[in-house]
Image (spheres, helix red, strand yellow):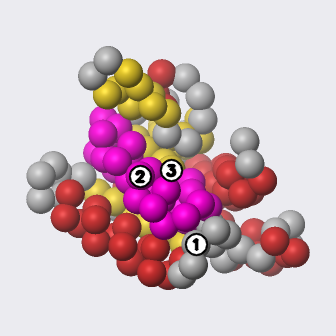
Amino acid sequence: MGQHEKYGKCVLKKAVDDLSCELNKDLCFKDSGNEVRVSYRNSEARIDGIVKTNDNQIQIAVEIESRTEKQIRGAIIDLYFHPYSKKLLVIIPAHQADSQKAKSQCEYILSELRKCKDFKFEVVLLEFEKSKELNKELIEQNKKLIKQAIKNLIGN
């Protein structure tokens, strides 16, 4: 797991833990097991994780990407084919020429894919500076962005 993915998962886990207390729900983030698998006929891929409750009332598929725009667009395919109807794409601005443009492209692609299959999605662009990745203020700011996206997906 790369440095950026570790950072993204760390912030996501903190956001989910906070939301679990805030909403009084047993939310958890999982990044392993059968639930992160995406089936492609005779093969499979894995997404970065899921956010869910034990009773499965909330189920969100999650991809965390810090790579190039083209690789981020590829992650959308894995999200699209994951069976959960709620999708969260977290973009960490690290290897994109223009991370805002990458976010905009992803939102457009996902909105077009919704014409073929009904699902809800959120795209979050985190704030990230390599020299400040462990900065508590930055982590708190990114946590808020993820918490809001999850709230939007679950209707809170």
Q: Which residue is mark 2?
A: 74
Q: Which residue is mark 1?
A: 96
Task: Please say if 95 is above or below 79.
Answer: below
Q: Amino acid at mark 1?
A: Gln
Q: Position of residue 26 (x, y in %)?
A: 55, 40
Q: Nearer the viewer, mark 3 or mark 2?
A: 2
The magenta segment is: 64-91
* Helix, strand or loop at mark 2: helix
Q: CA distance from mark 3 to mark 2?
A: 11 Å
Task: Please say if 119 is above or below 100.
Answer: above
Q: Residues within 10 Å of mark 2 (few under 14, many from 20)?
A: few
Question: In the image, what residue occupies the spot 18% across and 58% down?
Answer: 114
Q: Which residue is mark 3?
A: 63
Question: In the image, what residue occupies the spot 41% across and 25% down?
Answer: 44
Question: In the image, what residue occupies the spot 49% across and 39% down?
Answer: 47
Give whichever of 97, 154 is nearer the camera.
Answer: 97
Observer able to see residue 140:
no
Q: Residues within 10 Å of mark 3 (few under 14, many from 20)?
A: many
Q: Amino acid at mark 3?
A: Glu
Closer to the chain start, of discs 3 and 1, is: 3
